[in-house]
Amino acid sequence: MGMKTKLLIAGVVAVGAYFYFSSDDEPPADTSFNDAYVLEDGSIVAISASTPERVRVRHINNGKIQAFYHHGTNRFDVTNGFSNKEVIAKGEFLYSNDGKVIGATLVDEGKSKVIERLPLKHEDISFQSGDLKLRGKLSLPDGEGPFPVVIMIHGSEDYSAVEYYSLPYMLAANGLAAFKFDKRGTGASEGEYTQHFPTLVGDVVAAINKLKKREDIDPGKINLAGFSQGGWIAPLVAKEADIQSIMVGFGTVVELYKEDRWGYVKQLQDKGHGAEELAKADELNKILQSLIDNPTDEAWDSLFSLNDKYRDEKWFKDIAGSDSVLGQVAERALSSSYSFIPEFVWKAYFRYRSNNKGDNFNRLYDPMTTMRTINTPSLWLLAGEDSSLPTPETVTLLDELKQQGKPVTYKVYPGAEHGNVLFELDENGQKVYTQYVDTYFTDTIEWFKSQN
């Protein structure tokens, strides 16, 4: 095998897919529309920024999603779904005398409809976590309080929660305060982006301590909403602070190496492969995992040898791009155009991963040990067709906790992908996402209302 291919695989294992992709910074999205709105039929939607040209509109009562393409003007086109560009209606935003968006009018099939912005209160809040200042936003219902509060815990994304998260508006429209903040190193928060669980737990605890000092927040009713990776972090926070309840959206209680393995297992299953192909993939993955702890020449040689052996087989091509380290390796190993990573980069990365700082905690962490020690009520809303997290194994472990008397509840949404979104397959077998699960938002809201 040539050195370029060796460096390719080493680089992928070392630093992941991030080094292979770059994108130009685009102008910031317009957040002036962000809030909850009521339709003429009494149903509520949450509008939040998406791109400089559009906002996303999420319907609480049925999970439907729309887009308002405004192109930086007060007029907009309405489309259904996440990516459908077919215009189904037209509209115009309405403004107060001081220039604030107060609603919109829609013209649909010749009929005019009005959307009104709800009288919620929003406050920008900065708080200190160690030496860093993090930016947050508190959304409050109409009224005096004190209110129960739900704190958003991020997934692994690196974008601004303050600008893009819409669940806080839904919660505030239903009588619950909600707080979102930019993860360190994202948005307007200081520091470097990290996925190190103890560090992220500390940031959430710092947010809790900040909110507890407010007269409009009930310090005895602090709740957590964790999404994806946040499902690992929320129970750790509950070990450190007095938490009323937890909702986890599309999360898991398995260890990280099992979560990573599921990415290629699910893709092999979906493409009709069986035990023989899975055993080959596991053989490769075992070497990849060992390289993180002990990057010996023998391990590298074994990886390169197996890569040469399997790269032309169909299953190898079918796992390419799956949500796993092995899937990223396969995708890059099969690519005809790629950049190599200098040797010093991946060696430095392995030194970083092999010490007890950074992400090493994550890889060794067993979430069930935490779940067995806390008695915080939790609701897990799981995607039945999740290609990122292993829902079947998660259900087994949650059942085990329930049998032990832990206050755990879960619901599996059949046909839903990661994010609790529904999809259809196009003519090429690719997923086209259509909307959220119809009860996902209402299940979330009713859970927190019942706990508070």
Image: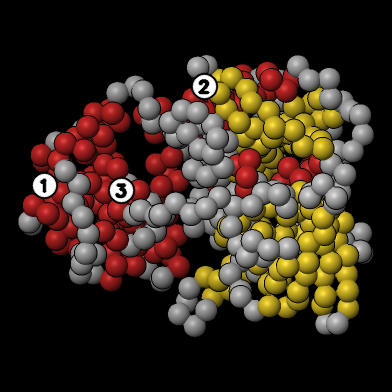
Q: Quadrant of residue 448?
A: top right
Circle 3 sits on which residue? 19
Which residue is denoted by mark 2 in the rendering?
A: 132
- Kindly identify the amino acid type of the residue bearing the numbered disc 3: Phe
Q: Nearer the viewer, mark 1 or mark 2?
A: 2
Residue drawn 84% across the image and 25% down it:
216
Q: Are marks 1 and 3 in contact (CB under 8 Å)?
A: no
Note whether 189 is above or below 323 in the view shown: above
Badge 1 amino acid: Asp
Q: Residue at x 82, y 77 (%)?
A: 108
Q: Earlier in the sequence, mark 3 or mark 2?
A: 3
Inter-mark Cα distance, 1 to 3: 23 Å
Residue closest to the far left: 2
Quadrant where the C terminus is found in the figure: top right
Q: Say if mark 3 contacts mark 2, CB within 8 Å.
A: no
Q: Amino acid at mark 2?
A: Leu
Question: Along the polypeptide, which appears first: circle 1 or circle 2?
Answer: 2
Any mark on residue 301, and which? 1
Question: At which x and y percent is residue 342?
Answer: 16, 43
How far apart are labels 1 and 2 at the CA level?
43 Å
Q: Count neighbours of disc 3 (C-alpha within 10 A) and say few if under 14, some if 14 to 19, many if 20 or more.
A: few
Q: Which SS class for mark 3?
A: helix
| In-image side of 362 versus 353 (left or right) | right
